Image (tube, rainbow, N blue to C red):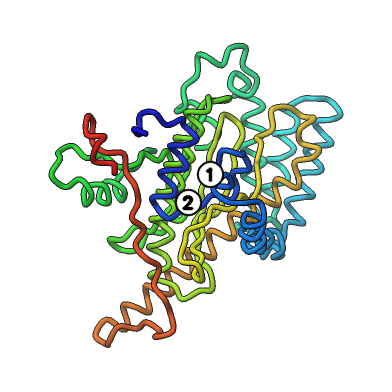
Amino acid sequence: MASDDLTPVERKRMCAGLSGVIDISDYSHQGHRSLFIISQWKIIKECNARFKRSFFQPRLDSDLHSVYIVWDIIHKTLAQDHNIFHARKTFNHLSSENHTNEYTFKQLQIIDHILDSFDNKQYILNPAKTTKFTERDYESTIWSGESVEETTKKKAQQYGSDKNIIGFKVDIRLIHDHEDLEIDLVSIDISLPFPDDAKVCHDESKLLRESAISTETIHHLLNDDYVYTWTIRVSGLTAILSKVLYDDERQIYVNIYQFTLIFPTCISDLEDWKDSLESLFKFKEDVERIANKVQKELKHTQRCIYRSEDISPERKLAPTPSVYFTPPRNEAHRSV
């Protein structure tokens, strides 16, 4: 079968498989589960279930008590009179109190962003017509970029004789910046609401392969039990967060769903958003933990630069993923 004859789901499955990535967050019967019998797929999911649970188990390092107090007051104010102006005045007063330290003040900015969106961005929260918006509108207005550098290098290695090689376009990257290095921690791709199957499969496939490259980079730096980076696939006001981790025992990259975040569009949505707030802060702290480990290891490597290579003999380096890239235009035969 020619690659042009593949369905979007089949193409995604092929690209991930050729890149050494298995997607256990895809519950469809056409996903990777279709390649295994039921008992095999059950074993695969059970082996990786602990990595999903690990995100929800750690307690937050941050004390969200002050944030929750402000959240409850703001929600109560809005529920009583539905007046965004009064709620914003109340928020500004509470967030500027003398006992509010700098760290708590920064945490409170998510509430300010939601209130500002309710006040000034109803045109995108509750639009009369969604057809007038672009992906960039959702990126800059709600999720607040396009970077292709690292995957462009990887693709150029694969198709080096061609000109104008361009890698994966990722809308937003969260990176750890260290001197002349940029270590990717999170890859984010944004689409319009309700994308068709072809768009969903294309974006998921791109993020999986992009994150496998990022995870490989971090695994070569850290000596942890398991190493991962994050992907976030945004569709309008909905964000789906997953980890792409390196399974050291099986030497494969695994995509594992973590949680879904839906940006609130009205006051009634806020009542149940406290759990989302906690998940959001857990995600933030998790990314910061990865960044701190990377920074510590980079500094250690600098101190050891004149010594022998500082890698434990027991440690197995992650294999460089042979990431599949779509071949240059009119060169589909080179995808084999």
The amino acid beneath tag 2 is Val
Whole-percent x, y for residue 158 in the image: 23, 49
The amino acid beneath tag 1 is Ile
Instruction: Answer left or right for 150 relative to 191.
Output: left
Task: Tell me the quarter of the picture where residue 236 sits.
Answer: top right
Q: Residue at x 37, y 75 (%)?
A: 299
Mark 2 Cα shell of 10 Å, populated few (<14), some (14-19), many (≥20): many
Whole-percent x, y for residue 83 in the image: 77, 25
Instruction: Answer left or right for 17 relative to 308.
Output: right
Task: Tell me the quarter of the picture where residue 162 sits.
Answer: top left
* Location of mark 2 (residue): 186
Looking at the rendered structure, the number of numbered marks drawn on it comes to: 2
* Helix, strand or loop for disc 1: strand
Whole-percent x, y for residue 116 in the image: 62, 31
Q: Quadrant of the C terminus?
A: top left
Rounded to the nearest angstrom, the CA distance separating label 2 from label 1 is 7 Å
Placement of 194 over or under 26, stated as above or below = above
* Helix, strand or loop for disc 2: strand
Instruction: Answer left or right for 86 relative to 261.
Output: right
Instruction: Answer left or right for 251 relative to 32.
Output: left
Which residue is nearer to you in this view: 293 or 152? 152
Which residue is nearer to you in this view: 27 or 172? 27
Q: Residue at x 60, y 57 (%)?
A: 102
Instruction: Say whether disc 2 or disc 1 marks the residue closer to the N-terminus.
Output: 2
Which residue is nearer to you in this view: 165 or 31? 31
Circles 2 and 1, Cβ within 8 Å, touching? The answer is yes
Whole-percent x, y for residue 142 in the image: 55, 33
Q: Residue at x 30, y 51 (%)?
A: 150
* Location of mark 1 (residue): 232
